[in-house]
Amino acid sequence: MDRRSGLMLGAMALLLAGLSAVWMLQGIGGGNRGFILGLRGTKLAALVTVATAIGVATILFQTVASNRVLTPSIMGFDALYVLLQTGLVVVLGGAGLAGLPPGPKFLSEIAVMTVLASLLFGTLLLRGARDVPRMILTGVILGVLFRSLSGFLGRILDPNEFAVVQSVSFASFNRVDATLLPWAAAITAAAVLAAWRLSARLDVLALGRDPAVSLGLAHRGMVLGVLGLVAVLVSVSTALVGPVPFFGLIVAGLAHGLMRSARHAALLPAAALSAAILLVGGQWLFERQLGQAATLSVVVEFAGGLFFLYLLLKGRIR
């Protein structure tokens, strides 16, 4: 990592630390400070965990896909998770789903998501990695298919069970299941550490299939392994706050723009820090300054959608 990248990452880390301190300490006066700090600390940990998972997952996915437009959400990862949740409600019912132990349920969902995503999207990327328009079109079609199936299953549910499905279909940074946070943080940390250890191989993978194979990289196994990490990270973030389709696109664009380097040793932490700064700072702004007059997830999706159209119109896909 060059000196400029190191200084930039250090500045981003300091900015995140400052925002975190403001988030935790602003308005702390009399009363039960311990209770307030506990609530704020839990929410801060959830925001940082989600941000890290989305940022790293997007960089990994764009490396595998060899372009800067595709993200896991655009390719239907989030829709697959919602379909899985809808299927569980249909089979078990709302009460049965709520009665499952949170930890084992969370781990089981991640395992199923990892297998399904690796099979579906691994096949797609391995066969069509050189045809970017086909990948985008296929990913959008798969996302629409999964959402349509979720909608069809939702129509046969009673209103109470349908409300359970709706709660996982839209992102909310105010709704975090604290019981899942230790599991989510541990899994995210393990996946990010694995991605960090693969950073040199990811640099080779980003060169393309033929150059990577000529340099001795086991391309197919590497692609499937990285997709497994992406599926795990997307499952963690979606389980905690719900789907956030375009947030990863914004974060990846910031990471590339700030680092000006293709080295994953710099891109991965830059994406994680950028995402955390945006989520913590944005949630602080909307919650503390604007009094919930607007919703962060809606603003993120609107800005991300505009950025997606900008990349498509400019042709900046690599």
Image (cartoon, rainbow, N blue to C red):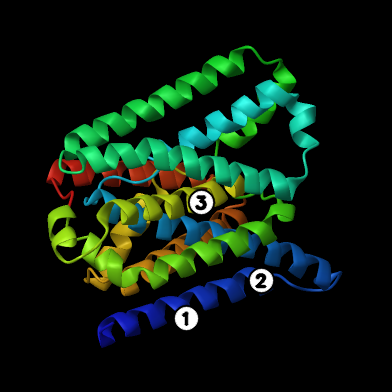
- Looking at the rendered structure, the kind of residue marked 3 is Val
Q: Residue at x 24, y 63 (%)?
A: 217
Element carrying mark 1: helix
Q: Residue at x 31, y 38 (%)?
A: 123
Q: Residue at x 26, y 48 (%)?
A: 65
Q: Residues within 10 Å of mark 2 (few under 14, many from 20)?
A: some
- The answer to which image quadrant residue 246 occupies is top left
Q: CA distance from mark 2 to mark 3?
A: 29 Å
Question: Is the Cβ of the residue at disc 2 closer than 8 Å to that at disc 3?
Answer: no
Q: On the rendered structure, is 83 left or right of 270?
A: right
Element carrying mark 2: helix
Q: CA distance from mark 2 to mark 1?
A: 15 Å
Which residue is labeled 3 in the image?
232
Residue 198 is situated, as x and y percent measured from the top left of the image, at: 36, 68
Of callouts 2 and 3, the N-terminal one: 2
Of callouts 1 and 3, the N-terminal one: 1
Residue 115 - label = none
Q: Residues within 10 Å of mark 1 (few under 14, many from 20)?
A: few
- The answer to which image quadrant residue 258 occupies is bottom left
Q: Depth check: 292 or 60 in front?
A: 60
Which residue is labeled 1 in the image?
14
Q: On the rendered structure, is 216 left or right of 175?
A: left
Residue 210 is situated, as x and y percent measured from the top left of the image, at: 13, 55
1 or 3: mark nearer the eye = 3
2 or 3: mark nearer the eye = 3
Q: On the rendered structure, is 259 left or right of 317?
A: right
Question: Is the Cβ of the residue at disc 2 closer than 8 Å to that at disc 1?
Answer: no
Residue 192 is situated, as x and y percent measured from the top left of the image, at: 47, 65
Element carrying mark 3: helix
Which residue is labeled 2 in the image?
24
